[in-house]
Amino acid sequence: MEVYAGVDVGGTNIVCGLVTSSGEVMYQIKRATEVSKGPDAVLEKIAAMIEEAAVGYAEQSGSDISVVAAGIGLPGFVDPDEGIARFAGNLGWRNLPAVQRLQARLNLPVYIDNDVRTYVYGEAMYGAGKGYNDVLGITVGTGIASAMVNDGKLFYGFRNMSGELGHIVMEGLTDPCPCGLHGCLETYASASGMVRQAKKGLRSGEASILQNWFPGEQLEELAAADLSRAYDLGDPFAKSIMEKAGTLLGRALSYAVSMVSPELIIVGGGGALAGDRLLSPLKEELFSRILPDYRDHLKVVTALNNDDAGVTGSAMYAKQKHISTTI
């Protein structure tokens, strides 16, 4: 049986899976990235995981398999045409010829792209966006990024830099962003941004049940899931943090909708886990800021395969690229 390897590389973990030509994940493994060991060690781990997955699935299924090609989703700026990881801050990579090295190691076709694009591609083609032609996907996690899929193809823009929704500067926000700008959307509306804003408010004396849960130095342990827990218990402070984040996301998406006119918006990452706590204010703000001709034909949903979309998207991206280069 012919399968495709899909690899989702993060700063903490690498997830590798084998995916059928129809987009079904058949086998999956997860390992620590161990960034501190350097790029050569990480690339070797990716290659070893693909081989391990192939052996594991063959033993589990009792059938012969052939890995046709591998797709790798990498964080940061990626040049998919040249096969180079231009810059990945959380990996410490710059201008790394990832495809060249992995192809030499694995002796099979390898294709790379930005991890958010491969994630959105997986959700658009095989998840919540299946059956839609024009899909805008957004991931809300440590940062915020987006990608657009039109008629089964990803949109890249000049220098492959489209989709940095998290770095839209929002009126009323002033916090510095690691990118060098001030007031970027993700400084407030990402999962880490919401936590940062909550900590700031609690340190300044805002009343909240979170003060009891995380007294003193324990405040550093506060996570996005704790905001959801407090929200569900009716905590006004936690509710204000999440509602403002949702409102800001909706405002930023209204700009994107007017530019690219999607028929579906998929919210993935940690933002998908927040559900209506985030989506309700997001949709209220979004729909109040776009023309009726957009609003009446637009749906906003959470990711269907939030955990597997990165693997599925990377594998099916490899399939699409491999077929297009062999025709």
Image (cartoon, rainbow, N blue to C red):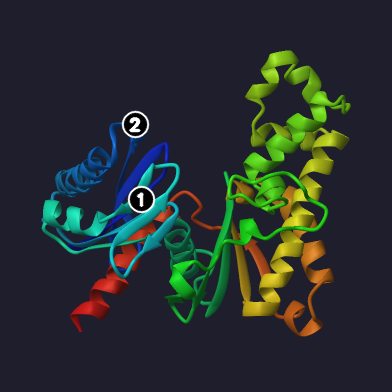
Give me the C-alpha separation between circle 1 and circle 2: 15 Å
- The answer to whether the residues at label 1 and label 2 have Cβ atoms under 8 Å apart is no
Left or right position of 279 against 98: right
Q: Is residue 233 left or right of residue 323?
A: right
Kind of residue indicated by mark 1: Arg
Mark 2 — residue? 36
Across and down, in percent, residue 217 comes to: 69, 15
Query: Picture coordinates of residue 22 (x, y %)?
Result: 33, 68
Residue 101 coordinates in the image, percent (x, y): 18, 53
- Circle 1 — which element? strand
Local packing at callout 2 (Cα closer than 10 Å; few below 14, some 14-19, many 20+) is: few
Q: Residue, x 82% and y 71% (percent of image)?
A: 289
Which quadrant holds residue 263?
bottom right
Residue closer to the observer: 219 or 284: 219
Give the label, 1 or 2, closer to the camera. Answer: 1
Residue 185 visible at all: yes
- Amino acid carrying label 2: it is Ser
Q: Which mark is residue 6?
A: none
Picture quarter with the N terminus = bottom left
Q: Is residue 37 above or below residue 117?
A: above
Q: Nearer the viewer, residue 84 or 274?
A: 84
* Residue on which disc 1 sits: 94
Name the image quarter holding residue 211: top right
- Numbered label tally: 2
Which quadrant: the C terminus? bottom left
Residue 251 sits above or below residue 87 on the image: below
In the drawing, does residue 96 fall left or right of residue 268?
left
